[in-house]
């Protein structure tokens, strides 16, 4: 009888242990919620920026290699001079003088060699005036520009 009780106990213990294992397996088989897939927007923007065309800079012509071409273009644009009109040419003692007028109707009488701001009068003709302007850009590079101003015709 003792043997029977011991066997019965062993059977019951194994049965309970086996049933406990099944409940644990059932717990492990619970349904996991689906995790949504998240797109990395910053990564997508970065990938798009890599695909864009790269600009190049000619360092030989550019004084500052850390400046973008657009900024360089803006900074190196030359300032326009005051728009002067040639309204008359005088001849006194064999020397020619030019009568110039700015948009505010202020007049100037100039001869060859005189300066107007950064410009110099190079030649006075019979119906024209040649002005040479020396300008310096942001990087100190000087350039000469000549401008021909023709005599303003009188309106009737």
Image (spheres, rainbow, N blue to C red):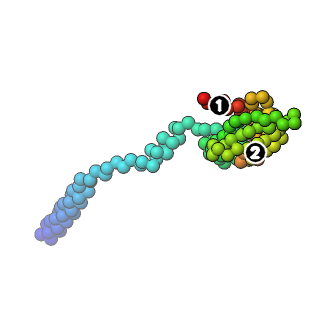
Q: Residue at x 58, y 38 (%)?
A: 54
Relative to 73, residue 124 above or below? above
- Is residue 40 rendered to the left or right of residue 55? left
**On the rendered image, what quadrant is the N terminus found in?**
bottom left
Q: Is residue 82 visible?
A: no
Front residue of this view, candidates 48 and 121:
121
Q: What residue is pinned by disc 2?
A: 116
Q: Work out how far the residue at label 2 is from the one at label 1, CA to CA, in angstroms.
A: 24 Å
Q: Position of residue 24 (x, y in %)?
A: 24, 60
Q: Quadrant of the C terminus?
A: top right
> Residue at the spot x=48%, y=41% of the render?
48
**Residue 106 x, y percent position in the rendering:** 67, 46
Q: Earlier along the polypeptide chain: callout 2 or callout 1?
A: 2
Give 35 or 61, whichever is nearer the viewer: 61
Mark 2 neighbour class, 10 Å CA radius: few under 14, some 14 to 19, many 20 or more: some
Is residue 151 visible to the viewer in this orientation of the structure? yes
Provide residue 26's location: percent of width, then percent of height.
21, 56
Q: How many marks?
A: 2
């Amino acid at each position: 009888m003792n043997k029977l009780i011991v066997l019965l106990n062993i059977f019951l213990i194994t049965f309970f242990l086996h049933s406990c294992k099944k409940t644990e397996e059932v717990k492990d088989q619970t349904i996991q919620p689906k995790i949504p897939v998240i797109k990395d927007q910053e990564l997508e923007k970065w990938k798009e920026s890599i695909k864009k065309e790269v600009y190049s800079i000619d360092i030989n012509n550019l004084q500052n290699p850390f400046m973008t071409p657009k900024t360089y273009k803006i900074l190196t644009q030359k300032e326009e001079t005051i728009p002067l009109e040639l309204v008359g040419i005088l001849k006194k003692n064999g020397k020619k003088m030019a009568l110039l007028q700015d948009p505010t109707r202020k007049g100037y009488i100039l001869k060859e060699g005189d300066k107007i701001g950064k410009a110099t009068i190079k030649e006075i003709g019979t119906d024209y005036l040649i002005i040479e302007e020396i300008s310096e850009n942001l990087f100190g590079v000087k350039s000469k520009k000549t401008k021909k101003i023709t005599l303003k015709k009188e309106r009737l």
